[in-house]
Structures are given as C-alpha cells and as structure tokens.
Image: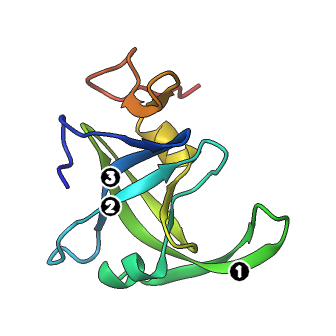
C-alpha cells in the first residue's frame, strides 16, 4: 500500500475507506503498519484490531469503557502512543483495541484536518488548508 500524495481512497456501498499508516512511537525498530481504515465521523477514536496491536507491539496503557452500536458497554485496552499518517498529514494518538478492522474516528481526523468529500465518498485533506493542517485554538 502506498501512503503518500497519490493515496487512493476506497469506497463500498456508501462506506468510506482510506489507506493509513500506523507507527508505534516507542518501538523505532518496527516497520510502520499500512492498512485500510473505515472512516467514521460518528466514532470518536482510532480503533484497531488485536492483530495490529500485536504486530506493532503496542502495550495497554489503561482500560477504557466503550459504548457499542448496540448500546452495550465493554472494557477494552487503550494502547499507544501511535503515529497515524494519511497523505501529507499525521497525528499522534492512542487507540482502542476492538473489532476486526481499523476505524478512523473524528478525533484523529480533526487533528489531521481531514474532511469527507461527500459526492466522491473520499477522505481528503481540508481544501481550505491543503498544505498545512489548520486548527482552531481559541
């Protein structure tokens, strides 16, 4: 998977997927993990499956209680720190370990100043700040 300016988003039946790169910031000897992520503005956090946490040798920092789509609650490991890269953007975050696919939520998307292009069903850098992520700090 090529993570860079020529990044291609994938979409299936209205779902938006994007190619991202995950790096364990504490294990410099490990290669980054390139993966497809489901882009979900209704989710807050980055969520990764257990096998990616194992591949990146991520340690649980704490347990977090999460509310699932069916209304149930579950304790899950919160791991990190991770660097997330999408095209010319990156951010630093932790991740919840749950599910069977990577889920890119609103917090890392906001941190990287990314938006969903609705008609193309693609994740893109904010067109108002194409070169440098912008943020509101007031």
Q: Earlier in the sequence, mark 2 or mark 1?
A: 2
Residue 126 versus residue 3: which sits nearer the camera?
Answer: 3
Residue 119 versus residue 61: which sits nearer the camera?
Answer: 119
Tag 1 secondary structure: strand
Tag 2 secondary structure: strand
Rendered-image quadrant of the C terminus: top right
Q: Position of residue 90 (x, y in %)?
A: 32, 45
Q: In this view, does 19 lie above or below 115?
A: below
Tag 3 secondary structure: strand
Looking at the image, the residue that sits furthest to the top is 128
**CA separation, marks 2 and 3?**
6 Å
Q: Which of marks 3 and 1 is nearer the N terminus?
A: 3
Instruction: Name the residue located 67 percent from the left edge and 45 percent from the top edge.
Output: 42
Residue 98 versus residue 95: which sits nearer the camera?
Answer: 98
**CA separation, marks 3 and 1?**
26 Å
Q: Position of residue 55 (x, y in %)?
A: 31, 81
Q: Where is residue 102 in the image (x, y as percent from the top left)?
A: 47, 62
Q: Count how many numbered circles sit on residues in the image.
A: 3
**CA separation, marks 2 and 1?**
24 Å
Q: Check whether the beta carbons of the residues at disc 2 and disc 3 lie within 8 A of each other.
A: yes
Left or right of residue 136, residue 91 in this image? left
Left or right of residue 63, residue 55 in this image? left
Residue at the disc numbered 1: 75
Residue at the disc numbered 3: 20
Q: Which of marks 2 and 1 is in front?
A: 2
Looking at the image, the residue that sits furthest to the front is 13
**What is the image's colouring?**
rainbow
Quarter where residue 82 is shown = bottom left
Q: Which of marks 2 and 3 is nearer the N terminus?
A: 3
Instruction: Name the residue located 64 percent from the left edge and 79 percent from the top edge.
Output: 76
Residue at the disc numbered 2: 35
């Amino acid at each position: 998977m090529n993570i860079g300016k020529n990044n291609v988003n994938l979409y299936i039946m209205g779902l938006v997927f994007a190619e991202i790169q995950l790096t364990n910031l504490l294990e410099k000897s490990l290669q980054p993990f390139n993966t497809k992520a489901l882009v979900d503005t209704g989710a807050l956090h980055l969520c990764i499956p257990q096998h990616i946490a194992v591949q990146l040798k991520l340690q649980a920092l704490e347990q977090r209680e999460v509310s699932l789509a069916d209304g149930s609650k579950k304790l899950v490991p919160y791991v990190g720190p991770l660097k997330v890269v999408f095209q010319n953007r990156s951010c630093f975050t932790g991740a919840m370990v749950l599910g069977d696919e990577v889920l890119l939520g609103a917090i890392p998307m906001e941190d990287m100043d990314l938006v969903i292009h609705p008609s193309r069903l693609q994740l893109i850098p904010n067109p108002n700040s194409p070169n440098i992520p912008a943020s509101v700090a007031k």
